[in-house]
Image (cartoon, grey):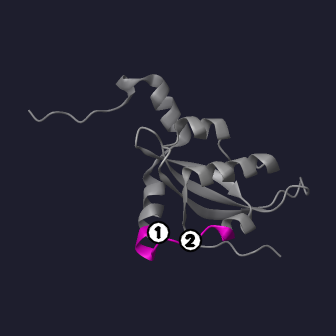
Amino acid sequence: MAPPLPRTVRAVGTAQLLDLAQEAAMHGFSQRLPVDWLQEHLAAEATHYLFPRLVQRLRHRPEVPLQWRCQQLLTVRTGEQIQGLLDVLPDTFDKLPETLDTASKKDIVSRIERAVTQREWVERMAAGPSAVALPEEPA
């Protein structure tokens, strides 16, 4: 029987997130950003957040362990927060310390839901400064 999906948010530093992404790559999990992309774009001293959303079991690939698909709130070097997905082993997630209060968790989930995706952010960055909408000056 699969462990129940926790309804919580966990905070991790950049180094820890890179380790989680490396573990996901090692297991061949499908939802993860490449470690080299993360190293290039994440803010080095930032806190990032993981929110488990579903249990992922690949019945067509029984050699792949069960994982929890987590939404991520990532802080990139520009200071913006973007969302992504990361598949994490339940035991690995359970070992992450619980450091956030209920109000903080609710705020983070709300920010995840409003954040642009990693793909949207990459496309906007590739389009250059003209793709970034600037606030209009008052008349």
Q: Residue at x 55, y 37 (%)?
A: 119
Reply above or below: 126 against 71: above
User: How far apart are the alpha carbons under marks 1 and 2?
Assistant: 7 Å
Q: Position of 64 compared to 111: left or right?
A: right
User: In terms of secondary structure, where does tag 2 sit?
Assistant: loop
- When asked about the image quadrant of residue 110, the answer is bottom left
Query: Looking at this view, is 130 or 93 the one in front?
Result: 93
- Which amino acid type corresponds to the residue marked 2 in the rendered image? Thr
Q: Does residue 14 show up?
A: yes
Query: Looking at this view, is 45 or 117 the one in front?
Result: 45
User: In terms of secondary structure, where does tag 1 sit?
Assistant: helix
Q: Which mark is residue 105?
A: 1
The residue that label 2 is drawn on is 8
Does the magenta segment cover residue 104?
yes
Q: Residue at x 48, y 43 (%)?
A: 43
Q: Residue at x 40, y 73 (%)?
A: 103
Q: Quadrant of the C terminus?
A: top left
Q: How many C-alpha atoms fall within 10 Å of the one at disc 1: few (<14), some, or many (≥20)?
A: some
- Which amino acid type corresponds to the residue marked 1 in the rendered image? Lys
Whether pointer 1 and pointer 2 mark residues with C-beta atoms closer than 8 Å, the reply is: yes
